[in-house]
Amino acid sequence: MKRDLLSEYDLKVEEIDGLFARAKELKAWLREGRPYRPLAGKTLGMIFEKASTRTRLSFEVGMIQLGGNAVFLNPRDTQLGRGETVADTARIMSRYLDIVMIRTFAQQTVEEFARHATIPVINGLTDLLHPCQILSDIYTILEHRGDYRGLKIAYVGDGNNVANSWINAAARLPFHLTLACPEGYDPDAFILERAYREAPCGVTLHRDPAEAVKGADVVYTDVWASMGKEDEQEKRARAFRDYQVNAGLVALASSRVLIMHCLPAHRGEEITSEVMDGPRSIVWDQAENRLHVQKAILEMLLKED
Ligand code: CP
Ligand code: NVA
């Protein structure tokens, strides 16, 4: 039975912890220069309908390090861009590839692709979710703090795909998530309501960023205008003016606070350079860990296939 990773709900809690343990091992082996190539002969297809630096590189390099191959597919150059249906494309790609990663707009597109594909499908970001990002972010917290359980994680900014994935993760895992979003930019209502009911340590949504970050172990932010929303940049800059992660806001968090951003950052907007380049920032480790966690994901999904 093939497995997909389209949302945080596609993994059992034990599997998430298992991925973190495996990522730690794979990272250590890479550091030691120990070759590990369980995916020899396997090919990952990567469909990108939006730009990417980290996701593309980490998946492509991850496959190469595990002994496999990766093929980059730009929908503009494939028949998908000329109207071949998602379902037919999924059927066809399943005949050539062993696994596929998709970055697109609608969550329904990855779900439809997965329904018609006979190979595992990974969500590499949609307008709704960014599950691979949040898995490696939690791994990064674990690496820096020894555990993620019981921590207070504060997300400040747009209620976007990254925020929604944080909420899904908090609905499954034992950490407390607080969010601060301006009115009109709340996370997805269904995702939030479900997390209010299910989260073991709670999810709270504030309007005031100071309330959200008070005593927080992690302060996390993301761009104010996600890919596809660039034309709202000016309007959003006004709406999010008081939501910048700067030294004043960070001073309200724990003295051991970790500063995180999925990147790319708009320095001087959602985060100041002082904070992003400051001593509490772990954004570079965070970006690197995409590689190690995704290798663990690829291995898990291909082993089960
Ligand atoms: N964080 C992240 O997904 O980065 P890219 O858009 O560069 O892939
Ligand atoms: N929320 C951002 C994340 C980029 C990795 C976007 O969707 O553009």
Image (spheres, rainbow, N blue to C red):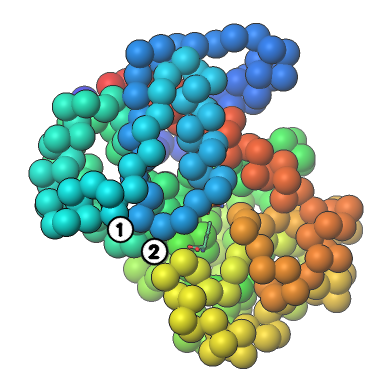
Q: Quadrant of residue 253?
A: bottom right
Q: Residue, x 18% and y 40% (percent of image)? A: 90
Mark 2 nearby-residue class (10 Å; few <14, some 14–19, many ≥20): some
Task: Say above or below: 124 vs 25.
Answer: below
* Residue 231 visible in rendering: yes
> x and y percent of residue 13 in the render?
46, 37
Relative side of 87 to 155, left or right = left
Which amino acid does the dot numbered 2 rest on? Asp
Q: Residue, x 38% and y 38% (percent of image)? A: 72
Which mark is drawn over residue 107?
Answer: 1
Task: Say above or below: 40 vs 48.
Answer: above
Q: Residue, x 85% and y 76% (percent of image)? A: 248
Q: Which image quarter is the C terminus in?
A: top left
Q: CA distance from mark 1 to mark 2?
A: 7 Å
Task: Say above or below: 138 vs 22.
Answer: below
Q: Which residue is mark 2?
A: 127
Residue labelled 2 has its Cβ within 8 Å of some atom of ligand 2: yes
Q: Nearer the viewer, residue 82 or 141?
A: 82
Which amino acid does the dot numbered 1 rest on? Gln
> x and y percent of residue 239 in the render?
59, 88
Among the two numbered marks 1 and 2 on one chain, the one whose residue lies closer to the N terminus: 1
